[in-house]
Amino acid sequence: MTRLNLLAPEYQADPYPFLAELRNRSPVCQVDPNGVWFVTRYDDVMAALKDPQRFSSEGLALLAEPPWLKPNPFAQSLVTAEPVRHGKLRALINRAFGVTGMARLEAFVRQTAEELATEAVRRRDVDFVQEFAFLLPRAVIGHMIGVDRSVYPKLQRWGMAMATVTGADTPEKQHEIRDALGEMGRYLDEVLEDRRRQPREDMVSDLLRAEVDGQRLSREDLVSFLYLLLPAGLETTTNLIGNMTVYLSRYPEHLEKAREDKAHRVNFIEEVLRIECPIPLGYRLTSTDVRIGDTTLPQGSMVFLSAASANRDERQFSEPERFLPGRDKQTQHLTFGHGIHYCLGAQLARLEARIGLEALLPRIQALVMKRREIDWVYSLAVRGPAALPVELIPRQ
């Protein structure tokens, strides 16, 4: 079997047949780029996620900070922190990102979703990614950070730069990413300084006030979290909403069910999260020699944990290639990870997806894709449509 390249066009277009073959023939193997180890079965991925001592998050830090990009504050963020530092950071950030913060956001999310849905349906023929799937999380992240609306257009460039670091294979792409992230860093420094002088009712001010056992977040911790928040809160949710739209068009029978039944809306979102994972890989570095099945991974090995494959593992899910909202074990997917690094923004992503559906579905009779082939975002880090030309047929 030829060694799989995760950046090959045929894999990016449809990775699932390749993943199914690996699960059955070579569940732990080396793949390109760079001969990294690739883990594809659910139980093996879960075991690694539960073992942060031997499967260190330093793997993600190394990928996020290649030699051409250093320094990248994302590489020192919560998602790459080892257990002791991670516990401190998460406790502080939870003060600003917990239930109270989500409750404060819900009214804003709903109002924004209603406005975007009204305008998209009025226009009827739209690129749903650009006119809804991206604009909703952009507004939410902008609102959370408290950025000026004049900066909103830059958020897409910054978020895409963060999400495509792993696919930057030319000097031109690398230059674009360095330029975007430099601009982003300068702006975030201005935001932090402004909130120190004049606190507001936004998340940055909450983070500056957060205190646990007499400790507060350092400037470096604050900047690294904001570098994490942008791709995690913007690109991930954009791709989740885009993937939901793809599956509404492929399975139109679920449109009416989701419109009438809140429980079905929740089930629909969970099944999209499972079957079209917007965060397809977890990145780890082995801190010692590790044996998985019949394969030994040497100390210092870069490991890709394939959530996209684990979520379709026939050993865990019945008929995993079928789209079945409400299936058994529907919330046992690994899209948001597991263990200490379980995604802090999972609740927010689900909230935006649900409210987005609730704003759109009462307004449309049908959603029709304008072309069959989907242009997927070219990245190891995220999975979602780059564009979605659709016709939104209004309800009469």
Image (tube, rainbow, N blue to C red):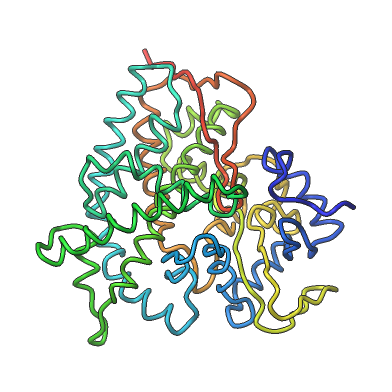
Q: Nearer the viewer, residue 177 or 217?
A: 177
Tell me which residue sits at (44%, 28%) in the image: 128
Q: Position of residue 107 (x, y in %)?
A: 23, 45
- Residue sitting at 59 percent across and 70 percent down? 59
Q: Position of residue 264 (x, y in %)?
A: 48, 40
Query: Which residue extends farthest top?
Result: 396
The spot of residue 245 in percent (x, y) is 50, 32
In the displayed structure, would residue 38 be above or below residue 181?
Answer: below
The answer to which image quadrant residue 24 occupies is bottom right
Residue sitting at the far bottom: 213
Q: Residue furthest left?
A: 198
Position above or below: 343 against 325 = below
93 relative to 173, above or below: below
Asked where in the image residue 130 lies, by quadrant, the reply is top left
- How many discs mark residues in the rendered view? 0
Q: Is residue 292 left or right of residue 119?
A: right
Quarter holding residue 194: bottom left
Q: Residue at x 22, y 86 (%)?
A: 214
Q: Quadrant of the C terminus?
A: top left
Q: Residue at x 58, y 59 (%)?
A: 334
Q: Position of residue 381 (x, y in %)?
A: 57, 53
